Image (cartoon, rainbow, N blue to C red):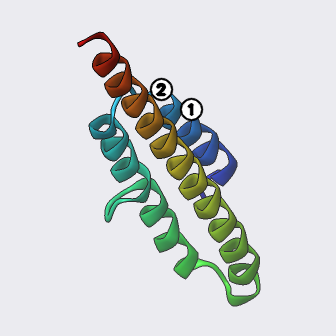
């Protein structure tokens, strides 16, 4: 099974390093997209024995929630930064 803690750390770091919404969406697709890292991890869940699948599924869902929260936080930060830039431009024009 994939190391979900590493995936979360990697996603958070990548999201934090994005400079604009387009970069963020590309990063989102890498982790949450149809053929992204988490989609591949979900496929591995099906291969686990039933007694292991429940715990692994819980860890998977927690990792996905953390990645989605980091994504939402970065979207908000980028939006606020863009708004600040627009306001600054208007003050000087």
Q: Quadrant of residue 83?
A: top left
Taking depth in this image into account, of 80 and 21 the one nearest to the observer is: 80
How far apart, in angstroms, are the residues tagged by discs 1 and 2?
6 Å
CB under 8 Å between callouts 1 and 2?
Answer: yes
Residue drawn at the location 34% of the way across and 16% of the way down:
91
Count of numbered badges drawn on the protein: 2
Number of other residues with Cα within 10 Å of mark 1, as a class: few under 14, some 14 to 19, many 20 or more: few
Q: Indicate whether 90 appears above or below 71.
A: above
Disc 1: which residue = 13
Disc 2: which residue = 17
Q: Indicate whether 60 appears above or below 80.
A: below
The percent position of residue 69, horizontal first and vertical second, equals 60, 54
Taking depth in this image into account, of 67 and 73 the one nearest to the observer is: 73
Q: Quadrant of the C terminus?
A: top left
For the view shown, which residue lies furthest in the top direction?
92
Residue drawn at the location 30% of the way across and 10% of the way down:
92
- Is label 1 in a helix, a strand or a loop? helix
Q: Quadrant of the N terminus?
A: bottom right
Residue drawn at the location 63% of the way across and 67% of the way down:
60
For the view shown, which residue lies furthest in the bottom direction?
50
The percent position of residue 17, horizontal first and vertical second, equals 47, 26
- Is label 2 in a helix, a strand or a loop? loop
């Amino acid at each position: 099974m994939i190391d979900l803690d590493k995936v979360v750390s990697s996603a958070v770091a990548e999201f934090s390093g994005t400079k604009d919404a387009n970069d963020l969406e590309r990063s989102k697709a890498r982790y949450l997209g149809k053929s992204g890292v988490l989609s591949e991890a979900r496929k591995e869940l099906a291969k686990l024995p039933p007694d292991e699948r429940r715990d692994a599924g819980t860890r998977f869902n927690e990792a996905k929630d953390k990645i989605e929260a980091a994504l939402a936080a970065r979207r908000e930060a980028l939006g606020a930064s863009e708004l600040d830039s627009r306001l600054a431009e208007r003050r000087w024009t």
